[in-house]
Image (cartoon, rainbow, N blue to C red):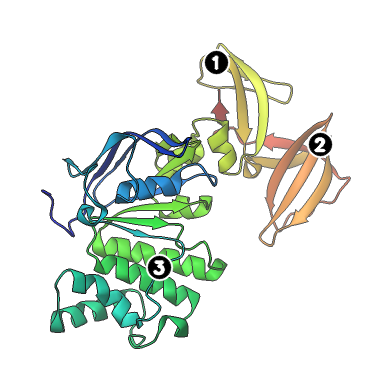
Amino acid sequence: MKFKRGSSSELVLKNIFVSLGDQLILDDVNLVVKKGELVSLLGPSGCGKTTMLKTISGLLQPDRGDIFMDDVNVTQETSCKRGAVIVFQDLRLFPNMTVEENVAYPLKLQGIDGKKRRDKVQKLLENVQLDGYEKRSIYEISGGQVQRVALARAVAANPNILLLDEPFSSLDGNLREDMRELLLNLHRTFDITTVLVTHDQQEALMMSDRIAVMGNGQIIQYDSPAVIYNQPANKEVADYFGGGNYITGRVKQGVFRSEQLTFPVAKADGLYQALFRPSALKPISGANYSVQYVRYLGESWQIEVERLGSRLLLSLPSDYYLKPGDLLDIEFDLEKVVMIA
């Protein structure tokens, strides 16, 4: 190998195909993760996210294609020589070892012993807020603390690339938020190139430098969170981030026309769907729409209105008060429209 272990690496996947049995799981995948980036793989179950992690780590061999780390082709290298460390959902800690021993294990494999190893373990446990838990067994700590041990052990392995397979999926809401912040702090501290598999859209949006949205073994769109959310490549990507109100119409000579509304738009002539997310609609005085239902969500109301068989969904602040049967009109925020061909 020509790259130094423990030095954050650029990752490049070129034309990767992976089959399991007779089923094609990854279908011509191309991906570039820059040094020090945190990239999320996002998509429904079965779309190939975990298979991609296993292929990057060397646990699975691609049928075709190449994997590069810092311009070095590692496709034929064994998992232990790639410097890619993977943390699975089940974490795979050693139950017969203490917290300290679990974190120290990869350091032993690297030949680090004595005071240097103890000092590094202590520092890592401080990084994951487990100072004082060194001598506890895995059975004596909480689920969130077990997650922290797994992350500390992964960082102790001195990875070039850190691979995380839905590491927070078993945690409740508050713990999940805490672990997200912890992971981001670790990422900033150690500057490790990181690939995170998640099915949680908000998690991907808040944590990632870039997001790869996957479907049917392919990357549908790969870009920054803001571009993915505001400029989805197609309806499939838009729906994965919550969708909203789709209004079908046609653009002709720079004007979008539909039954509900007409507005200028810088798009080529053709048939489009104008997506207005619920927060892009606002009730105004009028009587064209009737309120069908209201649902209280704490900080907001979810409200559905109807006009001539066409239904729209609104998200309004909790200080609004509407009830089924109320009549109103709708103002569309044209600055928030997403045009999908």
Whichever of labels 2 and 1 marks the residue nearer the N terminus, that label is 1
43 or 66, nearer to the observer: 66
| Mark 2 Cα shell of 10 Å, populated few (<14), some (14-19), many (≥20) | some
The image position of residue 155, as x and y in percent, is: 28, 66
Name the residue tied to disc 1: 254
Kind of residue sitting beneath label 3: Arg
Badge 1 crowding class, 10 Å Cα cut-off, few under 14, some 14 to 19, many 20 or more, is some
What is the count of numbered marks? 3
**How far is mark 3 from mark 2, CA to CA?**
52 Å
The image shows residue 289, relative to residue 196, as above or below, that is above
Cα separation, mark 3 vs mark 1, equals: 57 Å
What residue do we see at 51% from left, 15% from top? 268
Pointer 3: what residue?
92
User: Picture coordinates of residue 152 (x, y %)?
Assistant: 32, 71
Which kind of residue does numbered mark 2 sit on? Glu
Upstream in sequence: badge 3 or badge 2: 3
- SS class of the residue under badge 3? loop
Q: Quadrant of the C terminus?
A: top right
Q: Could you tell me if residue 138 is visible in this image?
A: yes
Viewed as shown, does residue 18 lie left or right of 154? right
Residue pointed to by mark 2? 306
